[in-house]
Image (tube, helix red, strand yellow):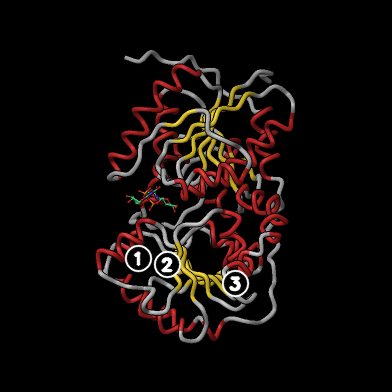
Amino acid sequence: MASRRKVLSVVGTRPNFMKTVPVVAALAARGDGIEHVLVHTGQHYDDAMSRVFFEELGVGEPDHMLDVGSGSHAQQTARVMERLEPLLLELEPDVVLVPGDVNSTMAAALVAAKLQIPVGHIEAGLRSFDRTMPEEVNRVVADAVSDLLFIHSPEARGNLLAEGAGESGIHYVGNTMIDTLVAMLPRIREQDSPGRHGLAPRGYLLVTLHRPALVDGPLLSDAIAQLAAVARELPVVFPCHPRTRAALDALGIDAAAAGIRLLDPIGYLEFMGLVDGAAGVLTDSGGIQEETTFLGVPCFTLRDNTERPVTVELGTNTLLGLAPERIAEVPALLGGERRPASVPLWDGEAGQRIAAVLAGAELPERPLPSRA
Ligand code: UD1
C-alpha cells in the first residue's frame, strides 16, 4: 500500500461537485497522508452553476481550473483533453477520479488512461441502453478505461460484467450524491426554502428540464403548455438551466405569462429545500431521481428510460416517458404518505468506502509515457 498516494479528481458540472465532495472529505478525514488535488474543467462556468456549489459544500476553490466552457461535444471533450494532459504529466497523480457521466468525465478518463494513470469512476455501471443520450456514451467509455469501478446500485455490477469488466475492479460502495444530501440535510431544512419562496409545504410541483431530447426540440413547447395547465391547480416552480432558458427564448415562449414560476439556477441548499418541500418533482435529471427516492418525494421522470432503475423498483420514481401530455396525470398522483426509500448503501458513508479503497487498492505501477 502506498502511503503518500496522490489522488486527482476531475469535476466539470453541477452534479459532479456533489458526487466528489464526500470523497475529498473522507480522504482528508483518514489522516493517512493521501494527497488530493481537485481539477475543475469549467464545463459549467456561471457562478450559479458552479461557484455557489463549492462555497456551500465547503471545499473552496478547485486547485486547478481548465476553463473549457461551452461548445459542441467534440470541442468540449477535446478542450478538456488538451488542457488536462499537461497537468497530469506535471502532477503525476497515482489515480485519477472521475464522477458521473458528463463530457468532462469521459474526457478526463480518456486522458488519464492514455497516460496509463489508473482511473477510478464514481457511479460506474449505470446504463440507460440508449446511445442517443450523450451521457450513455460517456458512461460506456469512462467505464471501459477505468481500473476502479465504484458502483452504487446492484444492477451496475451485471452491466459492467456484461461489457467485459473484471469482477476485481468493481467496488459496491454506495451513493456519494446521497452522502452529500445526508450531510447537508439539517442545513437544507434550516433554510426553509419553500417558505422563502412563499410556497406551502407539499403545496407545489417542482420542475427541472434540461436534456437535449426534451429541450432542444418541439417537445419543450408541449411541456410548457401542459405545465401551464397544472399551474392553474397548484403552483409550478421551475428553476431553469441556461440551456432551457435559451431554448424558451429562442421559441419566444413566455412561461411566466403562462403562470409558471420560472427561477434562475439556484444553489444546492436552496434547491434541495425546494425538492424536500415539494408535493412532487417533474424532471429529466438523473441525480434528482435518486435524491427524491432518498427523501420519499414522488418523482415523475419525463424520459423513455432511466439508467437508475433502482429508483423505480425501490423508490418513488415513475417513468412517464418522453411524453409531455402525461404531465396532465401528475396532480392526481400527488399527496399520500411520504415514504423515504431504503436503498442499500445509500447511507451517507459511500465517500468513506471509496477513500478506503483508494488508500488500500493495489494500483498498477505504470511509468508515465513521454509526451510524444
Ligand atoms: C451537462 C451534462 C448533463 C448534466 C448537466 C448537469 C453533458 C453531455 N451533459 O449538461 O449530463 O445532466 O450538465 O447540469 O456533459 N451553459 C451556461 N452556463 C453554464 C453551463 C452551461 O450558460 O455554466 C449553457 C451553455 O449555453 C451551454 C449549455 O448551457 O452550451 C449546455 O451546457 P453543457 O455543459 O454543454 O451541458 P448541460 O446541458 O449543462
Name the spot of residue 340 as percent of width and height, x first.
Answer: 69, 67
Marks 1 and 2 in Cβ contact (< 8 Å): yes
Among numbered discs 1 and 3, the one appearing first in the sequence: 1
Instruction: Say which of 20 and 184 sits in front.
Output: 184
Residue visible at 46% across and 68% down in the picture: 238
Residue holding disc 2: 303
Give the alpha-carbon distance from disc 1 to disc 3, as whole Å: 22 Å
Name the spot of residue 181 as percent of width and height, x first.
Answer: 65, 54
Residue visible at 41% across and 84% down in the picture: 229
Q: What residue type is labelled 1?
A: Leu
Q: Which mark is residue 170?
A: none
Label 3 C-beta lies within 8 Å of the nearest ligand 1 atom: no
In the rendered image, which quarter contains the C terminus?
Answer: top left
Q: Which amino acid does label 2 sit on?
A: Arg
Q: Residue 278 carries which label?
A: 3
Residue holding disc 1: 214
Q: How crowded is mark 2: few (under 14 residues within 10 Å), some or many (20 or more)?
A: some
Residue visible at 42% across and 64% down in the picture: 209
Q: What element carries label 1?
A: helix
Q: What element carries label 2?
A: loop
Instruction: Say which of 94 and 62 sits in front.
Output: 62
Q: Which amino acid does label 3 sit on?
A: Ala
Q: Comparing marks 1 and 2, which lies closer to the viewer? A: 1
Give the alpha-carbon distance from disc 3 to disc 2, as whole Å: 20 Å
